[in-house]
Image (spheres, rainbow, N blue to C red):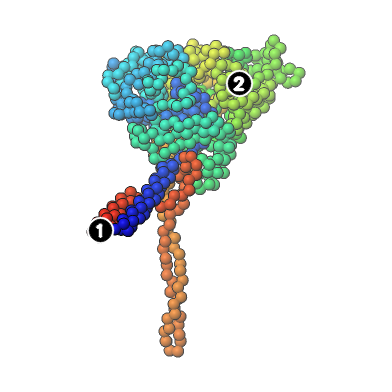
Amino acid sequence: MRRSGDQLFKILSLIIISLIILGIGSAMSFVSGQQQIIELKIGMPDQIDNFNPLIGTFAAAGFVRGLLYDTLLYVYTNGTYGPWLAESYSIDTQNLTITFKLRPNLKWHDGYPLTSKDVVFTFNLILKSNYSDKLDKWNLRKYISDVYALDDRTVVFKLSQPFAPALFYVSALIPILPEHIWSQVDPTTFKNMDNPIGSGPFKFLRYTPGVSIELVANPDFFLGKPKIDKITIILYKSTDTLMLALQRGDIDAITATTVAPELVPVLIRDPNIRIVILNGSGVLRWIGFNNDKYPFNIREFREAIAYAVDKKALVNTVMLGYAWPATDGWIQPLFGIWYDPNVTYRPQNFTKANEILDSLGFKPGPDGIRVTPNGTRLSFTILTISGVTEFERSAELLAGWLKKIGIDAKVSAQALGTVDQLEGVGDFDIGFMGIGMSITTDVDWYLYERFHSSQAPPIGQYAARNWARYRNPEMDKLLELERTTMDPNARREIVYKIQELIAKDLPVLTLYVKYSMTAYRTDRFVNWNEAEGPTSKISLLQVSPKKPEIITQTQVVTQITTQTQIIGQTATQVVVQTQVVTQTPSAQTVVQTVTAPVSTPAPSISSDVLIAVIVVLVIIIIGLAVYLMRRK
C-alpha cells in the first residue's frame, strides 16, 4: 500500500517536471519571438533643427516631422487632394467657408482622442494667440477670420476675403497638434525633441543626436498599422558616406537628399538598388544676395554677377547633366501652367558684366581687383554648406568667375545650422541656398515668404524665408493681388508678372534645378511606392518585408541499372536518368533584434499541441490514481 503510494508520487513528480519543462520551453520560444521586429533602415543627412512643425526649417528634420504629424488632407504627387485626418471637405464660395469632416475615432500617440477641438487650437495658435506674430509666417490672419468646431468631428474655416491658396494652407501645410500638450508650452521656442506626440503612422521612440532617430509603428493609425514595426533613421555627416552606406546595404533607402550624380553609374550596376526620378518635383539651387549690404543693394551690381555665372557649366561639370539651368524668374518649368515661358536666364557674358561694373564706377585696382568709388576693394565671402559636394564645387566655380570680372570672392564652407543662422539674420554677402520644388505645393508658398517685404526684418533679426531682404512695393502689390484672385487664368497672369519682376531685379540668382533622384534597395523589402516616393508617408505605410521566394532547383541524379538484353549475342547495359525536383526558400533576412542578438530559437510547441498533451497527461494521472486505489 505504501509502495503503491510511493509509485504514484514518483509518477506524479515526473509528470509535473515534464509539464514544467514544456511550459518553460514554450515561454522561452514566445519571449524569443517577441524580441524580434521588422526594422527598416533609412539614411539621411544629419541636419536636425527640431521636431516642432511650426518653427522647423530643415528638410531632413521635416521628413521626421511628416511621419509623426498629420494634416487634414494629403496632396499626391499629381497635385490632387485626398482624405487624410479629414474624410471629406466642402467649399462654400459664396459664404467663404471651408468645412472639414474628421474621421471617427482618431487618436494621438498617447491614446488621447483627436477631435476638431485640436484643429481649432492648432490654427488659433497661429491666428489668435500671443505667438501669432512669430508663427504666422504666411500672414494668414489677413484672410482667415475664424476657425470653429460644430462638433467633435466637424470644423469650419471662415475667410474674411477671397484667398486663392486657402485650401493648401489649412489642409496640407500645417499639421494638427494635440491641445493637451501644446497648450502647456511656448510654441515659438519648444523644440519638441524628447517625446513628440502626433497622430502619424509612426510613433517616436528615441533620438540619439548625431546617430539616429528611432520610430515604431502606430497600432492605432487610422489607415491601419504599417507593415513594418520600426524605422531607424541613421544620420550621416556627408552625402558621400550616406551613399556608400546604401551600396553596402547598411540602409534600405535614402531620404531628404538626392543621389549624387557621380554615383549614378555606380549604383545602377547593383541589381539590388533602384534609382527613382520623382516627377513634378526638383531641387532648386540659387545664391542669395544680401540686399541690405552695399553694393548688393544695387540692382545693376547683382546683374553683373548674373552675367559672370555659367549655368550650363554648373549643370555639366557639377551635376553631370542631372539638372537643367534655372530660369531667372524663380518659378521653374516644372510648375506647368504657372511658369512664364518668356522668362529665361542670362547666359554667361563677361563683356557685359565688365561694362556694368565700369558704368558703376568700380575700377580695377593695381592687383586687378576692382574698387568702389570710395576706394574699397570688391572683396566678399561666399557662404556655402560643407559636406555637400555640389555646394562646395559650385561655390569654387563662382569664385573663379567673379575673379575674372575683378571681384575677390573667398569661399566659406560651414555646417548647415551655421549657414542657416548666418543667412537668417543677414550676416553674409553671398549665400548658397536650396529648396525643393513640387507641384504638390501651391505656388504662393514659394513666392510670398521669399519676396514680400513683410518677411524681411532688419539685419540682426531672423528672417524665416526672405533672407535676401528684398523689399519692393510693386512686388508686394502683385503678391497680395495674386492671393485674392480666384480666377485661375487671371491669377496665372499675375504670377507671370511676379516672375518678370524677379528676373529683372535679381534679388536672388537661381543656378540650376537638379532632378529629384532618390534610391532604395530591393533585396529586403517590397511594395515601395515609386510614384509618391519610396520614403513618402504613403510608401512607408505599405512597404513590407520581402518573403522568401520559392526557388525550384532541378537536380539530375544518374542511377545505373544493369539490364541484360540478349539481342543476338550482345549484352546491353541501360542507363536510366531520374530527375529529382526540390523546392527551397531563398534566404532573405529582414528580422532585426531589439536589444541584443538572439540565437535562432528551437522549434516551439504550439498552444494547441501543448493543450492536447496536458489533457492526455491528466487522463493518465486520473487512470493511475483509480488503478492504485482499487489495488488498495
Q: Quadrant of residue 87 in the image?
A: top left
Residue 533 at x, y percent in the picture: 44, 36
The residue that appears at 32% across and 22% down in the rendered structure is 116
Residue 46 at x, y percent in the picture: 54, 31
Where the N terminus falls, by quadrant?
bottom left
The residue that appears at 31% across and 57% down in the rendered structure is 2
Give the secondary structure at mark 1: loop
Residue 158 at x, y percent in the picture: 32, 16
Residue at which label 1 appears: 632
In the displayed orientation, state which residue is furthest to the left. 630
Residue 157 at x, y percent in the picture: 33, 18
First in residue order: circle 1 vs circle 2: 2
Residue at which label 2 appears: 430
The residue that appears at 28% across and 53% down in the rendered structure is 618
Q: Quadrant of residue 532 in the image?
A: top left
Give the secondary structure at mark 2: strand
Q: CA distance from mark 1 to mark 2?
A: 105 Å
Could you tell me if residue 478 is visible in this image?
A: no
Could you tell me if residue 54 is visible in this image?
A: yes
The residue that appears at 38% across and 37% down in the rendered structure is 226
Q: Amino acid at mark 1?
A: Lys
Where the C terminus falls, by quadrant?
bottom left
Foreground mark, 1 or 2, reads 1
| Residue sitting nearer the eye, 91 or 305 | 91
Q: Is residue 567 above or below residue 152?
A: below
Classify residue 326 as left or right of residue 220. right
Badge 1 crowding class, 10 Å Cα cut-off, few under 14, some 14 to 19, many 20 or more, is few
In the displayed orientation, state which residue is furthest to the front. 2
- Do residues under tags 1 and 2 come within 8 Å of each other at their CB atoms? no
